[in-house]
Image: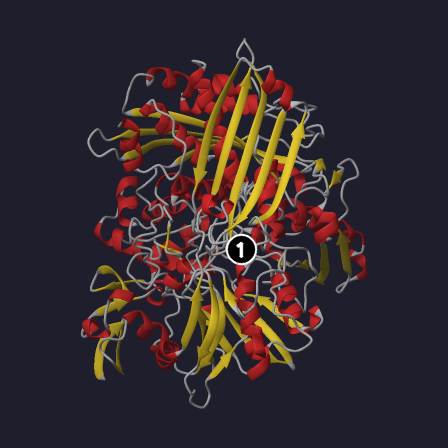
Amino acid sequence: MAKISFILNGEEVSVEADPLKRLLDVLREDFEALGVKEGCGEGECGACSVILDGKLVNSCMVPLGAAEGADIVTPEGLRETEKGKVIVESFADTGAVQCGFCTPGMMMAAEALLEKNNNPDESEIREALSGNLCRCTGYDLIVKGVKVSAERGKDLW
Amino acid sequence: MNDEIRKSVRRVDAVAKASGLAKYISDYNFGDILYARLVRSTRPRAKIISITVPELPDGYYYVDHRDIPEKGKNRIQMIKDDWKVFAEDEVRYVGETIALLIGPDREKLLSLLSEIKISYEDQEPAYTIEEGLACKGGAIVGDDNIYGEYNLVKGDPDTAFNNAARVIEGTYRTGFQEHLYMEPQGMVGTWEGGRVNIYASAQCPYYIQKSVSGALGVEGKEVRIKQVTTGGAFGGKEHFPDVIAVPLAVAVNKIKKPVELIFDRIEDISYTCKRHPSRITIKTALDKENNITGMTIDTVINGGGYESSTLIVLQRALLHGIGVYNIPNAHVRGRAVATNTFPSDAYRGFGAPQGLYAIEMHMSQVAKELGMFPADFKRKYFIKNGDMTITNATMKDTVKLEEMFAAADEMSGYSKKIREYKDDPYKGIGISFVNHGGGFTGNGEQEIIKGVVKMKRTGENSAALYVSNVEMGQGLQTVLRKIAAKELGLNYTDIEYDNPDTDIVPDSGPTVASRSTMVVGYLIQECAKKLKTKWDEGVGAEAEHHYKHPSEFKWDQDTLQGDAYPTYGWGINVVEVEMDKDTYEVKTTGIWTVFDVGIPMDDTIMYGQVSGGVVQGLGYASIEKCEVLDGKFRQHTMADYVIPTSVDFPQIKNRFIDNPYKYGPSGAKGAGELVFDAAAPAYADAVQQLAGKNIYDIPVTPEMIMGLEE
């Protein structure tokens, strides 16, 4: 057991836990960040995506110990921001959401992309989403959701 | 009117899902919960000699067939009730449920699980269709391993073949396909109100109720099933949830405490049903003028260790086996064979994709033999209104395939490109034509399902609808609201429609077979009309509507003769590809689709179905390989069972051709499976066009293409 401290959605938090516990489990069990979904537990699907120090990561592959001192954003944090609201609304308006299980992770991937590139073209969007699997949509409308997010949020990113 | 309903609206579930607020089964907190692990067979075919369970600490439970109540039955009441809840003295596949191990600590459960010792007497297993047909190791089922056989005959195929100038033959194979819904299987059982309650990620709450109550030996209403937000299903949550819900219910019935059973991904891929593998041999008889005079189709599908819904899947494979063509003399034969693989079950298309893949590839290959381009040849045989179908009824649809082909050709440039690429070994373009019958086969909606819907006025300007059909990603909660709202003159957001709970909703049938919009949507439309006449009775006014089969459609289920489906959706896919000269990797450079779904109930939701269905079909065609090795699925993680990512396929260009169906809501037909069916044959046709060699099997991998060259 160890005490690990990090910033979660803008707040300083700490947790006493096994440093090898998956960040995914810590976020869901200790912080009720239920928008972080477990789709595969092996770093393949991206449903558990969070942004850690500005980078998109699969939280199932991050041991809690590696989060010490990190700045972590989950869907719970992102959805409260102006940027997050633009992405949620854009996804809803473009039909990017079907079963929804991959969608919070897709939203994190969209945010991570737009922070780096606020005017991505289709191939840049597809590349940025390629670590996040979706079985319902065939991706076309998610790509559109990101494109519309970029247009609507051009003053935000 | 139709323009109004098709106009895209924002889905009712979109914001909650996108922002991570929607609760799936793993997001609920049931308080002090116990966890369950399945004790599974590690052998494909064996007699169980003995089972040794370690001494369990307090609060841990081992639940097996001996815990089924005396008045119950150790059988899962699916379409066929041959599948046992818990294996007793024999196992037929790796992963068969033997028991549940239950307790409060997940780590401890795993260590206890490893201490359970089962000794087996192994028997020789059969895995493939050929091994099953040959009764390798002795028959698993009956004396021939055949779950069932059907024969459909139209005209006089024997004479056609006897008089044929030429016969062309091909054998086509498709493999297992994993659904890979993003949310794995999961459910929680509780003891509330003195009875079993199941909260499940599932398509068919009443299927689960039937299975659970049957095994416990109680009336249906003595168990309650509540569907929770479901993270994708594609048929994988049609029957399979019964396979885990029933043991879970037996456990809850015994220990009277809440128990959670949620699969991790490796369990889910390893130990859930897949699409039936198929082997289909087609022979075409031609006269001297190269006209098709007859056809025989011999279909075998691999049902695995238990029958469950396999024969219904087989029927659909046969009823779609001859595709969109009018062949004067034909014999379609089908058999489902037992093997020692995990039982195969429902997957989007339900047999039709296998049949349609084979006929489409075959027709392209016959065209090539005759020196014709595929579309030019296939169009000569398009079935038309009034033509005789394979089940000896007239085609009642207005068939718009010619208009659809014109649209597909205009969008894709198919006719021009197929000529341009004729001698180009690195570029190809493929085309496929499909149809898909909406709703249950024949009179199943009347005889088996007997769907009922209810509606109620709940406020000044609001109403609730009560159906057992579920939202699983396809947009049903939005579409059914739109249908009800249109009749009542309300906004779709004024209609309440919760995830179904068998205590509250009538049985409007399962969420399967492309029936929910077409069949249940029509019931809602008619029910809403009734409610409208009672609207002035005030808040609380109710209406109910029951399914009634339109009298013009006749069907005999014993002989499989008559109107197999009241209507069909129709589809054309065009796929353009390029192949890398050195690696044989195929890149898809264009996808064009045209669909007749009657009238789309929402343009965006329907486009989402097209895009999702087509990409899932392209995965089936190209990369989704799933093999059995020693009775286990060799690909059992997301790293080795790969599905398409966002960079694998380009954006789809789609067009809908309107063709309203009289008994669909505002003219809608079934669509959810149709959109899957055409992709695989279009892709494989594109590759065979560039390769200049016939392709018979999918998935079409670079290794396979390299093999064609040699």
Q: Outermost residue, top direction?
A: B289
In the image: residue B191, left or right of residue A140: right
- What is the secondary structure assignment of the residue under circle 1? loop
Is residue B406 shown above or below B589?
A: above
Q: Tell me the subunit letter for badge 1.
A: B
In the image: residue B302, left or right of residue A74: right
What's under tag 1, amino acid-wise? Answer: Ile
Q: Residue at x 48, y 83 (%)?
A: B61
Screen quadrant of the C terminus of chain B: top left
**Quadrant in the rendering for residue B698:** top left
Residue B491 coordinates in the image, percent (x, y) = 62, 52
Is residue B407 shown above or below B184?
A: above
Residue B625 coordinates in the image, percent (x, y) = 36, 46
Q: Outermost residue, bottom direction?
A: B58
Pointer 1 residue: B140
Is residue B415 shown above or below A61?
A: above
Residue B697 coordinates in the image, percent (x, y) = 40, 36
Q: Residue at x 28, y 32 (%)?
A: B707
In the image: residue B34, left or right of residue B316: left
Is residue B404 shown above or below B276?
A: above
Screen quadrant of the N terminus of chain B: top right
Residue B220 coordinates in the image, percent (x, y) = 69, 68
